[in-house]
Amino acid sequence: MASNEARAHFTLAGYHFNPDHVTQHLGIQPTSVDASGAGSDLSKPALSSWEWSTKTVTDDIDVYKLTDELMKKLEPVKDKIVEICKSHNLSPRIGVVLVLSVDKNETVPDVGFGARTIRFLAHIGAFINVDYRLSKRI
């Protein structure tokens, strides 16, 4: 059977912006970008995104630890995040992606957020997204 898997990510998303501007402003290399909206015209808006993600972990999953890893990276630039969100009309979010094992003997990870993460999210005006799926049998 497959093990549980998880990762946490911080994403900035919006219309008509180039993710390279975020990289330059924050001084952090993203783990992924989607520049679909950078060149789209106003009649057909497309969403762009900038994301920094933890590595995917398996087995002993600790969502608190994963989001703390994000905080260590992002807290030093939280005011810059607020600036870029305002100047480019971006929506900030923290996400947790969980792939849960269908093995009945596998434990289910706790999903929660510590005070440090909640304070950070409140400061930058972000929201939380938890995405979960069941793994396929192998």
Image: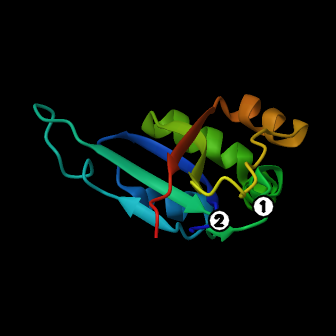
Q: Nearer the viewer, residue 109 or 95?
A: 109
Question: What amino acid is found at the position of numbered circle 2 in the picture?
Answer: Thr
Q: Name the residue furthest left.
A: 43
* Residue under label 2: 54
Give the answer, above or below, for where 28 lies relative to 21.
below
Furthest-right residue in view? Answer: 115
Amino acid marked by disc 1: Glu
Residue 26: percent from the left, percent from the top?
61, 59
- Circle 1/circle 2 CB separation < 8 Å: yes
Q: Position of residue 50 (x, y in %)?
A: 46, 55
Residue displayed at 64% across by 61% down: 4
SS for callout 1 = helix
| Picture quadrant where residue 44 is located | top left
x then y, percent, for residue 118: 80, 34
Return the x and y of residue 135 as percentages of the image width and height: 50, 57
Instruction: Report the residue at 87% width, 41% height from top.
Output: 116
Crowding at dot 2, Cα within 10 Å, few <14 / some 14-19 / many 20+, comes out as some
- Residue in the picture at 71% in, 58% down: 106
Image quadrant in which the N terminus is located = bottom right
Query: Which residue is tagged 1?
Result: 69
Q: CA distance from mark 1 to mark 2?
A: 7 Å
SS of the residue at dot 2? loop
Asked whether 75 or 52 is in front, the reply is 52
Name the residue: 63% across, 59% down: 6
Q: Residues within 10 Å of mark 1 (few under 14, many from 20)?
A: some
Vertically, is 116 above or below 50? above
Quarter of the figure with residue 136: bottom left
Residue 130 lies left or right of residue 77; in this view the side is left
Q: Nearer the viewer, residue 104 or 61?
A: 104
Task: Name the residue at the front extreme.
Answer: 104
Give the mark nearest the N terminus, 1 or 2. 2
